[in-house]
Image (cartoon, grey):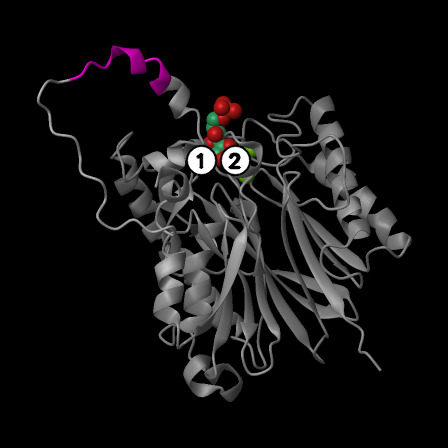
Amino acid sequence: MERVKTTVSVIKADIGSVAGHVVVHPDTIAAATRVLAEAKAKGVIADFYVTNAGDDLELIMTHRKGADSPEVHEVAWTAFQEAAKVSRELGLYAAGQDLLSEAFSGNVRGLGPSVAEMEFVERPSEPIAVFMADKTEPGAFNLPMFRVFADPFNTAGLVIDPKLHTGFKFEVYDVFEGRSVVLNAPDEMYDILALIGTPARFIVRRVYRRIDGEIAAAVSVERLSLIAGRYVGKDDPVAVVRVQAGFPAMGEVLEAFAFPHLVAGWMRGSHHGPLMPVPQRYAKCTRFDGPPRLVGLGFQVKNSRLIGPVDLFDDPAFDETRRTAQLVADYMRRHGPFMPHRLGPEEMEYTTLPEVLEKLKERFTKVEGAPRAAEPRIKTELLSRESKEGD
Ligand code: F6R
Ligand code: MG
Ligand code: MG
């Protein structure tokens, strides 16, 4: 007999916020809650928790319909539409921003919202962590996911616990080509790093335990500007991680966020800044629209019900991380409009900067006798997006 599987679906969208891109309004949370409560009463979903990370409305849902369920995605889409309606009534800023399409077509992927989903047979006790970031992009999870599932200096269990000792499989997704590759840690960890060190392009999408193929983590990979072809806000990502009893402990997962690493996002989605883990009450981006923030909620999943949450970063143990993040924020800000605070030209392609540069194009004149830059010596498909067309 097949055992019952529970699906955890975390789906988010920025449908408008108060006082600029700062924080979600409680009435939009209430509107989304009404839709999800109705879906729960009808038995479409088993349970839910609605919250926010800065200006992003976050729907955490459990059900038994598997990942990419049209029914569940439609519930999420309706919740965002209803919340966006309230957002427009209240004149909230950027109302409906992430809802790129008018019509739902069976799946929210590609329509604007970001999605992290995983299906599993519940263990007798099933603790999970849900991570929600604001003012950054999905690749922001690459470094912590690597540290959690492949770095024994972060995760003691990789050395000590036989279930973790055989390692984890990383599914790495190429957002530009829409394809993915599965690589094994620890054997192929240098290959994993060779890809995910480019977080704007290669994203850790899922992680599986090698000993039995059990899913361990799922991360959203949607990049809004690539879908819309223009800048429509950053692609603030979400992730779900299973913890304890043969997976990394909750503390090992959280440990990976004790280093406030630099991520892309922040002001106008165009700057590098530290990812600062915060309690839910500080999930609002203020200074220079940031710095990028991360909220973590812990739950137990029992018979597809959500027990919790626990506000995971509401702990003085993360005070020093936050202090370091402030120092790094100060240091980076002093670069003003210069790289590497401002993102590099490849990433700026998807912002409003090209419009500004366009008008200078005609004013450039050729300098006689000036040498042209040589073609790059190493040009591989994985490094250069243009290589296929350009060669
Ligand atoms: C970042 C973000 C904000 C805006 C910025 C300018 O993801 O959404 O930093 O880019 O506040 O917004 P507009 O152009 O709407 O005034
Ligand atoms: Mg916004
Ligand atoms: Mg946001």
Q: Amino acid type of disc 2?
A: Ser
Q: Amino acid type of disc 1?
A: Gly
Tell me if 64 is positioned left or right of 359 in this view.
Answer: right
Q: Which residue is mark 1?
A: 269
* Residue 322, above or below 385: below
Q: Secondary structure at mark 2?
A: helix
Image point 73% across, 63% down: which residue?
Answer: 7
Image point 36% across, 57% down: which residue?
Answer: 320
Q: Could you tell me how far apart the alpha carbons at marks 1 and 2 are, in whole angstroms?
A: 10 Å
* Residue 237, above or below 332: below
Q: Which residue is mark 2?
A: 225
Q: Which residues are magenta?
A: 357-366
Q: Is residue 349 visible?
A: yes
Image point 51% across, 72% down: which residue?
Answer: 169
Q: Is residue 257 visible?
A: no
Q: Dividing the image into 4 quarters, which one contains the N terminus?
A: bottom right
Q: Nearer the viewer, residue 286 or 272?
A: 272
Question: Percent from the top left, x then y, of residue 2?
Answer: 81, 78
